[in-house]
């Protein structure tokens, strides 16, 4: 199996057929077809389904496609690492950010990267913490900010900050005590993300330990839509104060601290122990750490910094 065959596989998949791929790859159509036939023969598997409408991947082809992308990305990282040994730090770095983190951190990270490392190309992917962890381990991501649940021996992780979660409501529906004991959550109609979401797991675990049964009227995996629904007074939700900073400033939402006990979550920055860390990746980890610390120090992100201060 050759690298060019993996590139051809991706090219044919993206173009939808050999003819279109031959144009985009600048490879003669017969040579492209012969290369794919040789690869199928070597693997003893059919990679494409061919029809009058073009070519689509078989299950075997889809499996190889994922590996092909990871292999070619690793080759590119290796090339960048060699080239950077004697030149300015450069290359592509893929970063995973949970939605609530992306909301506050994306712009500062992009701005700082542009100023400090203009030759690093960032690719930021926003998703659930659980998905990001899997993508980090598979090689789709170089770095991810995650909500720590338990120690993962396949990841190198640096704890950064700890933030407390709060009840988020419309301002006229704030509990009068000024705080809410965790036991009183049972009387709140709630909108929460699905159980695959890291925040939901943290909330469910805390409530299970306190023997609190939640009244979740709907599961919504869109942070903007949860906030819009809470603004109507339909229900409350549980979020970090930082994720509703704009709404707090505008007076459209309010937060009430949860106590007895409080619910907190730890934010970490992680890389995979099974994949090489390039100079660009290492520089970006440091940059992310610096920017999140600045957000905490300035009060933009209400949290407690727990990483070692250099």
Image (cartoon, helix red, strand yellow):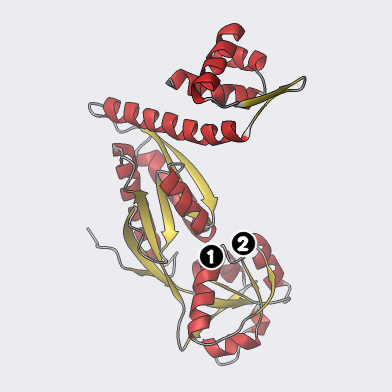
* Residue 181 appears in view: no
Q: Is residue 136 left or right of residue 30?
A: left
Name the element at disc 1. Answer: helix
Q: How far across and down, in percent of the image, does residue 150 sit? A: 39, 66
Residue drawn at (53%, 87%) of the image: 211
Q: Is residue 200 left or right of residue 310?
A: right
> Farthest residue toward the front?
44
Q: How far across and down, in percent of the image, does residue 38 sit? A: 52, 16
Quadrant in the picture for residue 60:
top right
Q: Which residue is mark 1?
A: 243
* Mark 1 or mark 2: whose residue is earlier in sequence: 2
Q: How far across and down, in percent of the image, does residue 29 sit? A: 61, 9
Q: Which residue is mark 2?
A: 223
Q: How far across and down, in percent of the image, does residue 284 sit? A: 35, 45
Name the element at disc 2. Answer: helix
Depth order, front residue of 272/166: 272
Q: Are marks 1 and 2 in contact (CB under 8 Å)?
A: yes
Tally the marks.
2
Q: Is residue 113 left or right of residue 166?
A: left
Residue 226 sits above or below residue 78 on the image:
below
* Residue 295 appears in view: yes
Q: Which mark is residue 66?
A: none
Mark 1 vs mark 2, foreground winner is 2
Task: State the quadrant of the N terminus.
Answer: top left
Residue drawn at (48%, 52%) of the image: 132
């Amino acid at each position: 199996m050759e690298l060019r065959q993996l590139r051809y596989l991706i090219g044919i998949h993206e173009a939808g057929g050999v003819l279109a791929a031959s144009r985009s790859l600048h490879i003669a159509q017969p040579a492209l077809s012969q290369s794919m036939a040789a690869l199928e023969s070597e693997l003893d598997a059919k990679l494409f389904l061919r029809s009058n409408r073009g070519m689509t991947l078989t299950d075997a082809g889809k499996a190889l496609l994922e590996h092909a992308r990871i292999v070619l990305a690793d080759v590119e990282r290796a090339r960048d690492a060699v080239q950077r040994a004697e030149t300015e730090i450069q290359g592509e770095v893929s970063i995973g950010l949970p939605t609530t983190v992306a909301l506050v951190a994306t712009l500062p990270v992009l701005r700082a990267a542009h100023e400090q490392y203009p030759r690093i190309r960032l690719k930021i992917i926003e998703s659930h913490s659980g998905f990001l962890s899997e993508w980090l381990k598979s090689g789709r991501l170089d770095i991810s900010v995650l909500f720590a649940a338990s120690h993962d021996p396949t990841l190198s992780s640096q704890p950064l900050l700890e933030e407390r979660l709060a009840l988020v409501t419309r301002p006229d529906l704030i509990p009068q005590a000024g705080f809410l004991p965790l036991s009183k959550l049972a009387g709140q109609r709630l909108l929460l993300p699905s159980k695959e979401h890291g925040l939901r797991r943290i909330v469910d675990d805390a409530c299970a330990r306190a023997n609190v049964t939640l009244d979740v009227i709907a599961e919504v995996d869109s942070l903007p839509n949860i906030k819009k629904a809470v603004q109507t007074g339909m229900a409350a939700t549980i979020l970090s104060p930082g994720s509703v900073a704009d709404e707090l400033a505008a007076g459209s939402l309010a937060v009430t601290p949860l106590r007895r006990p409080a619910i907190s979550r730890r934010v970490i920055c992680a890389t995979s122990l099974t994949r090489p860390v390039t100079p660009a990746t290492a520089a970006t980890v440091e940059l992310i750490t610096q920017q999140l610390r600045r957000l905490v120090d300035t009060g933009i992100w209400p949290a407690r910094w727990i990483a070692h201060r250099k």
